[in-house]
Amino acid sequence: MAIIRKHIFSILYRLFRFIVKNIVFGYQKISQNNKDLESIVEFGDKNLIRINKFLGKLAFSFVIPKGIELELFDLSFKSPLVAASFKSEKNLLDIWLKLGLGGATYKTVMKNKRLGNSRPRLQQIRLEREQCLVNALGLPGSGIKSFTKELLEPSLWNYNRPLGISIGGEDLDEYISNFNTIEKTIKGNVPDIYFYELNISCPNTDTGSCVGDDLTSLEKLVDHVRANCSATVSLKISPDWSNSRLRNIGDIIRAKDKMFVNAGNTQFRNTSSLGLKDGQLPRNGGGISGVALLPRTLEMVNMFNDIDIKIMATGGISTVHHLCAAKDAGAVLFGMATALIMDPYCIPKINYALVRN
């Protein structure tokens, strides 16, 4: 029954998304506004949450099959699929965990409330014959105080699956301050199944720089986090960085206990190279995500595997074939973002397919 149900709901979801996308884009064209995919995503999110409230068990509840679980340091994942850090709404994370994710990562948190860049800042494009997203969101979020309050709510912890806390910052001091605030708040107050993700590669800061650009600052950050908590820690790296820089970051990871690499993040492209018009993205470009990233993801996974580092492959994972390619390259966890927007029913599809592989 579950096998049939996941395919039926997948078809319905994709059909509904296709209809809504074309209606909204048509209206935006008639009203002479730039295309804005974020409006469609927001509309879809609200309706998924409504469905979850009334028909959640029927529409979203899938048992994770036995035999695909894994251990990473002191964390137990019932499935190797993990939501990448791009959403913090607990109702959406709840849906994806119901569908069968082994864990989830909260959206990267900054110290202060941020509105992000001006809209439109999220678009869907076709790149190398694949549907991809490109975003220049600018890390909108409620800020550290609001986020830490949400972390203490029990609903997501009740799944007993690892939750990642992704930390960002404008500079080294903000990273350390954000980490200190979160660790002080949650230590002993939530189940000991969380891990930290240090998002050292997001360019959506006010300065356009990130702590990963400076290896000395990065070492100081890792030293501080590792000295002040026993939780597992990951570093989220950029596919735009050279392999030489990535190997240097790998050396930092190997020198510490209970650390892994998240390879990787979105890949920057300018507006003209994506076939977008002026005004369809702020800052003349954004980070692409989706299947087009997979070749670079596999390249990074192979490289980190060669230097014996545990890896979460993020970028281009949407089918069991993508996952198996990353697994063969050396990854143990698989981050998902764009695929969860395009069709969240890829989660049970991949989980059940893994049993057969």
Image: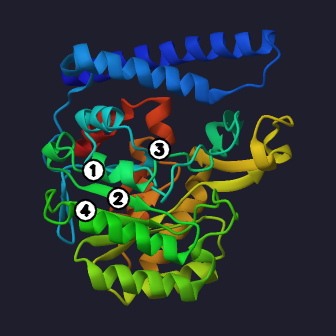
Earlier in the chain: of badge 4 and badge 3, it is: 4
Earlier in the chain: of badge 2 and badge 4, it is: 2
Q: To which residue does mark 1 refer?
A: 151
Q: To which residue does mark 2 refer?
A: 165
Q: What amino acid does circle 4 point to? A: Thr
Q: What amino acid does circle 3 point to? A: Ala
Coordinates of residue 350 in the picture (x, y in percent): 33, 40
What residue is drawn where x is 54% and y is 84%?
A: 217
Question: Taking the image as drawn, is residue 280 in sight?
Answer: yes
47 vs 149, left or right, is right
What residue is drawn where x is 34% and y is 71%?
A: 180
Q: To which residue does mark 3 refer?
A: 337
For the residues labelled 2 and 1, say whether their Cβ atoms are less than 8 Å apart: yes
Residue 131's quadrant in the figure? top right
Q: What amino acid does circle 2 point to? A: Ile
Coordinates of residue 345 in the picture (x, y in percent): 36, 29
Q: Residue 185 carries which label?
A: 4
Which circle, 3 or 2, is nearer the viewer? Answer: 2
108 vs 163, left or right, is right
Residue 48's quadrant in the figure? top left
Coordinates of residue 177 in the picture (x, y in percent): 42, 71
Compute the Cα span from label 2 to label 1.
Answer: 9 Å
Which circle, 4 or 3, is nearer the viewer? Answer: 4
Earlier in the chain: of badge 3 and badge 2, it is: 2
Q: What amino acid does circle 1 point to? A: Leu
Mark 4 Cα-neighbour bin, 10 Å: few <14, some 14–19, many ≥20: some
Compute the Cα span from label 2 to label 4.
Answer: 13 Å
Earlier in the chain: of badge 2 and badge 1, it is: 1
